[in-house]
Amino acid sequence: MSILAQVDLISPVDEREAASIAGLRQHLTQKDPYSEASSPHHVTASCFVVSRRGVILHLHRRLGIWVQPGGHIDEGEEPAAAALRECEEETGLTAAHCDPPLLFHVDVHPGPRGHTHYDLRYVLVADPEDPSPPAGESPEVFWFDFPEALERCEPALRAALAKLAVDPTVQSVRHWQS
């Protein structure tokens, strides 16, 4: 399914997400919308990693805020694959997409060095084991129950996390786990 078809399935949680979806639609018409090298505006991929323990957040090394794992999409990589790769790189956890993969949220926000990120946020499921981020990544990666995640996270992330906490698809996946 195309990114635009996946975006069509999202009910925006607030005006910020509605504006982000409109911006993403326009940006996807550009040449190389995923390329960090071709433009300071590019699509990124991140993930809400869930288990019966809650959701993963990490303290971003450069920004000093609690957010979900994510980052740039490598050349030739699909956004959903980038979300899986970023999860493993930043948490040490092996996760899986829901079946089918669930593009859950879209957010446009400033990135470093004057860049703008059009972030595609997927839901991933992981075993409820402790994260073990590799050297060079933020060592502060933890499972949080949803109330604590809502308190700790970057304020712009709260609406998406609140929606995630009550989403029936996400809840069924979390409760299905042993």
Image (cartoon, grey):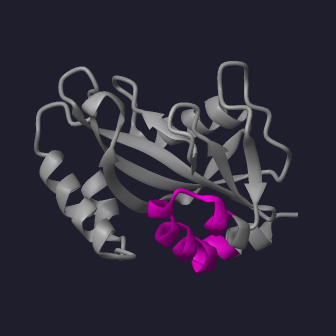
Does residue 36 appear to the left or right of 102 in the view shown?
A: left
In x, y percent, where is residue 41? 22, 37
Does residue 25 appear to the left or right of 166 in the view shown?
A: left
Between 87 and 66, the residue placed more toward the observer is 66
Count the labels in the image.
Answer: 0
In x, y percent, where is residue 15? 28, 74
- The residue at 72%/67% (across/down) is 148
Q: Quadrant for the N terminus, please.
A: bottom left
- The residue at 34%/74% (across/down) is 12
Between 147 and 175, the residue placed more toward the observer is 147
Q: Quadrant for the C terminus, please.
A: bottom right
- The residue at 11%/45% (across/down) is 29
- The residue at 36%/71% (across/down) is 10
Q: On the image, which quarter does residue 32 sit in?
A: top left
Does residue 20 appear to the left or right of 123 in the view shown?
A: left
Residue 163 in magenta? yes
Q: Is residue 2 visible?
A: no
Q: Residue furthest front?
A: 64
In x, y percent, where is residue 124? 61, 53
Q: Is residue 43 visible?
A: yes
Up-down: is 10 above or below 62? Answer: below
Residue 27 in magenta? no
Up-down: is 144 above or below 74? Answer: below
- Prevalent SS, magenta region: helix
What are the residue bounds of the magenta stretch? 149-171
